[in-house]
Amino acid sequence: MFSQQRSIVQRPWFIPACAAFAVVCWIATAASQSISRAPDSSAASFTLSGEIPAHSALRATAHYTPSGSSHRCNYPPALLQHDSAPDVQAFNFEIALSYSLPDCEMLLSEVSLVIDGFHGEQHALRSSTSGGVIAIRPDMSPRQKNGVPGFPASGAKEYRGLCSWRAVWAAEGQAEARRLECEAADKDWKVASDGRHQRRPGGAVSRQQLAGKTIRMTLRMAEPAT
């Protein structure tokens, strides 16, 4: 008996093959979008460097927001993280001021720092706190730069912070609890003494002045009170 030949869409392997092909296409598209979201290494950037106390680690998070001048810029804010190497007290990050997405430019708006301090037996206990913040202000004319000091002639600006361990109540039988706190310090490593306002290390800088510059964030442990 003559058997009628099935069309290709009627064959049992056709639908699974189409599904597999669709998955491959989706992965390829997602990968290409992920790559396109990465900052362009040739874009303008600045250097964030500094030092942190022993037995600590630092994470810098660069916050990017869509440019207001870009058309069809419907992307949400983006975050890019930079981590210090373990057991190294000095860090050095290169942070892009912007990067491009389809029909959109993402601009750096802030760099926030989180420092993890380790204490206790074999430094197995950890406490995290803000290590400071650098706010990136929009390009401004000289008359508009109220409260946003420029960079020194050296091209490097330094912020300082003093960190200390504060005792925290712990239930009987539990390990000693401590909380790490960091406050802004001046050039003489002094912090506000009134105790009412705890200011984080850092400050604000103008975007138009930032390309090619260096910002240093130096964090130290305060001397124990005597």
Image: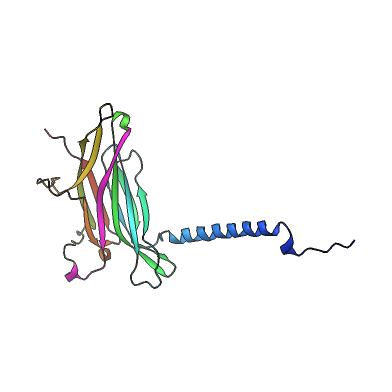
Find residue 84 and report its horizontal and vertical position in percent: 34, 45
Is residue 110 placed above or below 122 in the rendered structure? below
Q: Residue at x 34, y 54 (%)?
A: 94
Vertical position of residue 146 compared to residue 57: above or below: below
In the rendered image of this protein, does residue 146 appear above or below residue 167? Answer: below
Name which residue lies at 25% across and 33% down: 177
Direction from residue 53 to residue 83 in the image, left or right: right
- The quadrant holding residue 9 is bottom right
Q: How many marks?
A: 0
Colouring scheme, one of rainbow, by chain, secondary structure, one colour: rainbow
Instruction: Please identify the quadrant where the N terminus is shown.
Output: bottom right
Q: Which residues are magenta?
A: 124-144
Quarter in which the C terminus is drawn: top left
Provide residue 107's location: percent of width, then percent of height: 34, 64
Question: Which quadrant of the figure has residue 28?
Answer: bottom right
The residue drawn where x is 22% and y is 42% is 181
With 49 as the anchor, is 143 left or right in this view? left
- Judged by its main secondary structure, the magenta piece is strand
Q: Residue at x 23, y 55 (%)?
A: 156
Q: Among all residues in the image, which is located at the extreme left?
A: 194
Place of residue 209 in the rendered image (x, y in percent of width and height, measured from the top left): 25, 64
Inspect the magenta stretch and tell me whether residue 139 lies in it: yes
Q: Is residue 30 magenta?
A: no
Name the residue furthest right: 1
State the image coordinates of residue 86 (x, y, percent, origin top left): 35, 40
**Between 163 and 50, which is closer to the camera in this rendering?**
163
